[in-house]
Image (cartoon, grey):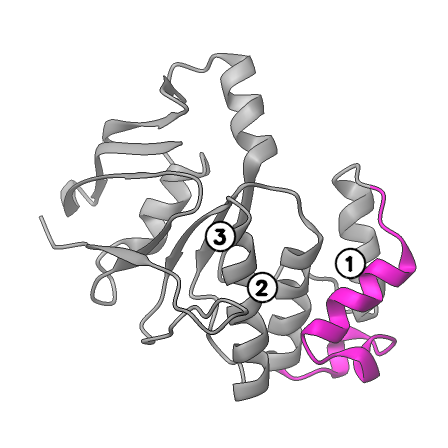
């Protein structure tokens, strides 16, 4: 379980947002909302350990990550899949090469067939062998999102995952996210778009929300 307790953030000697608290358990989805510039990305980065919090703490299965117990931090990182605004892709590699390279860096075994299947789910089968530099921004975004079909991480933290997606890709991503939650995964995401996460049987996934406000 992920617990966020009174997290605060200061930018330029001024609090960015009011202290935020919530918890997320297996099989749950939480939508983080707020105006542009309120600090949603900053909060996600704090939760993932990429930025420093100026107050409060983040706990994983009841243990504080800020106390730097190596075994707790290691377990959290193993359970985490974070996708921010940057695609973290190499333009000189093809779409499928990017997925295979990403898996190799992470120490995971990934077959060509599984990588191709992940790209096909995002509508990129016919673009799999093109270098990223010739793809559109939407196609690059879909290549990055294809990683979600290949990870065993239990906690997905996604910053604006629906940006630059066409209708078909959006529907495909909805199914991927919903399946993850159905299988006991956790999903924390930001989005300015009102997107419903559909289960494969047509029922809606239950989504809670946290509204961030200025301090």
Q: State the residue lying farthest toward the front.
A: 201
The answer to whether 199 appears left or right of 40 in the picture is right
Q: Which residues are magenta?
A: 109-136
- CA–CA distance between discs 3 and 1? 23 Å
Residue 181: mark in rendering: 3
User: Residue drawn at (48%, 12%), measured in percent from left and top?
Assistant: 69
Residue 25 seen anywhere in this rendered image of the structure: yes
Return the disc, 3 or 1, that comes first in the chain's sequence: 1
Residue 89 in the image: state x and y as whole percent. Answer: 69, 61
User: Residue drawn at (79%, 69%), measured in percent from left and top?
Assistant: 95
- CA–CA distance between discs 3 and 2? 9 Å
Q: Would you say residue 118 sits in the magenta stretch?
A: yes
Q: Secondary structure at mark 3?
A: helix
The answer to whether 4 appears left or right of 138 in the picture is left
Q: Nearer the viewer, mark 2 or mark 1?
A: 2
Q: Which residue is mark 1?
A: 99
Residue 167 in the image: state x and y as whole percent. Answer: 52, 87
Depth order, front residue of 38/104:
104
- Indicate the quadrant containing the N terminus: top left, top right, bottom left or bottom right: top left
The answer to whether 58 appears left or right of 131 in the picture is left
Q: Nearer the viewer, mark 3 or mark 1?
A: 3
Figure quadrant of residue 13: top left
Mark 3, residues whose alpha carbon is within 10 Å: few (<14), some, or many (≥20)?
A: many
Disc 2 vs disc 1: Cβ atoms closer than 8 Å?
no
The answer to whether 134 appears left or right of 176 in the picture is right
Position of 159 relative to 54 (above/below): below
Figure quadrant of residue 106: top right
Q: Which residue is mark 2?
A: 176
User: Residue drawn at (34%, 48%), measured in percent from left and top?
Assistant: 42
Q: Secondary structure at mark 2?
A: helix
């Amino acid at each position: 379980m992920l617990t966020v307790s009174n997290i605060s953030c200061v930018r330029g000697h001024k609090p960015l947002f009011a202290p935020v608290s919530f918890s997320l358990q297996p099989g749950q989805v939480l939508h983080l909302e707020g105006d542009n510039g309120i600090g949603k990305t900053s909060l996600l980065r704090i939760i993932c350990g990429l930025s420093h919090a100026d107050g409060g703490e983040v706990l994983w299965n009841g243990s504080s990550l800020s106390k730097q117990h190596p075994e707790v931090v290691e377990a959290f990182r193993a359970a985490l899949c974070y996708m921010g605004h940057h695609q973290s892709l190499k333009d000189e590699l093809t779409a499928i090469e990017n997925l295979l390279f990403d898996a190799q860096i992470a120490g995971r075994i990934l077959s060509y067939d599984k990588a191709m299947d992940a790209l096909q789910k995002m509508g990129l089968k016919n673009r799999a062998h093109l270098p990223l530099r010739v793809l559109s921004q939407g196609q690059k975004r879909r290549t990055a999102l294809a990683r979600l079909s290949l990870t065993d991480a239990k906690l997905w933290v996604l910053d604006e995952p629906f940006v630059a997606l066409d209708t078909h890709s959006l529907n495909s991503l909805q199914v991927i996210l919903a399946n993850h939650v159905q299988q006991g995964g956790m999903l924390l995401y930001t989005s300015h778009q009102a997107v419903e996460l559909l289960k494969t049987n047509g029922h809606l996934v239950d989504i809670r929300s946290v509204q961030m406000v200025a301090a």
